[in-house]
Amino acid sequence: MSQIRIVRIHNELLGTYGDQGNAEVLAFRAKFHGITTTIIDVGYNDPLPTNGDIYLLGGAEDAAQLLSLEALQRDDNLNILHFAIERGAVILAVCAGFQIIGNKFWANGQEVDGLGLLDVISVPGDKRLVGDIKTISTVLGFELTGFENHMGRTILGSGAEAFGKVVTGNGNGDSKFDGAVLGNIFGTYMHGPILARNPEFADLLLTRATGRKYAQITDPLALKYASWRRKVIK
């Protein structure tokens, strides 16, 4: 595959913490590997495209999160995501997006049904968790760094695996694990944006989306930056 479609979902709602930058990082890394990309911005009133290769959701406050959920439950959008997963598309959901794709979460003082793409539930915490976070991803086999800012506590069901083991920070709220993963569906609390701080992860998503191996960083600048970030966060 020499061309991929990156679908950025509800940037006007889920772009509070800069996670829209994940699309630009994927496009940059893809260009480095000789892949042509198209970034498709899907607004609140737009239907999801059926032919996306990577679907991205970012972070937001409760009101915007609920609006995004409502739009994704509308028409055929949820079916489109299910079909995309079945054909091997990648989903990366950060913070509010992570909660949206789970089974249930709390927003504006109420429990709501999520999209059910990941077997997790998110419940309210008693304080906001803010700061740098470092994890060792048992799924990916390397360290990741990011920045967390959330009050939710996420509990994994039997159908999901933790995305990473927390070294520094709080992750899902227990200071043990961050995020969840199932196949090509990745959920995490790490902003940054996460792909800007962890270009290896961007390459791995490209690997998953194209079937070609790009997980090994070869350009010195990206490798140096990723190494520096991990040394800064102890």
Image (cartoon, rainbow, N blue to C red):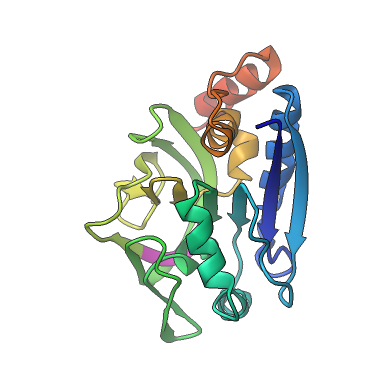
In the picture provided, is 213 more to the left or to the right than 139? right
In the picture provided, is 71 more to the left or to the right than 81? right
Give the quadrant of the C terminus: top left
Q: Is residue 149 above or below residue 29?
A: below
Give the x, y percent position of residue 108. Answer: 50, 84
Q: In the rendered structure, does residue 150 fall within the stretch colored magenta?
A: yes
Give the x, y percent position of residue 163. Answer: 38, 44
Q: Which residues are magenta?
A: 149-153
Picture residue at 77% right of the left edge, 45% below the top? 38
Picture residue at 59% right of the left edge, 18% below the top? 217
In the picture provided, is 203 more to the left or to the right than 221? left
Give the x, y percent position of residue 126. Answer: 37, 72
Asked whether 53 or 181 is in front, the reply is 53
Identity of the residue furthest to the left in this view? 158
Asked whether 39 or 50 is in front, the reply is 50
Q: In the rendered structure, does residue 35 fall within the stretch colored magenta?
A: no
| Residue 74 visible at all | yes
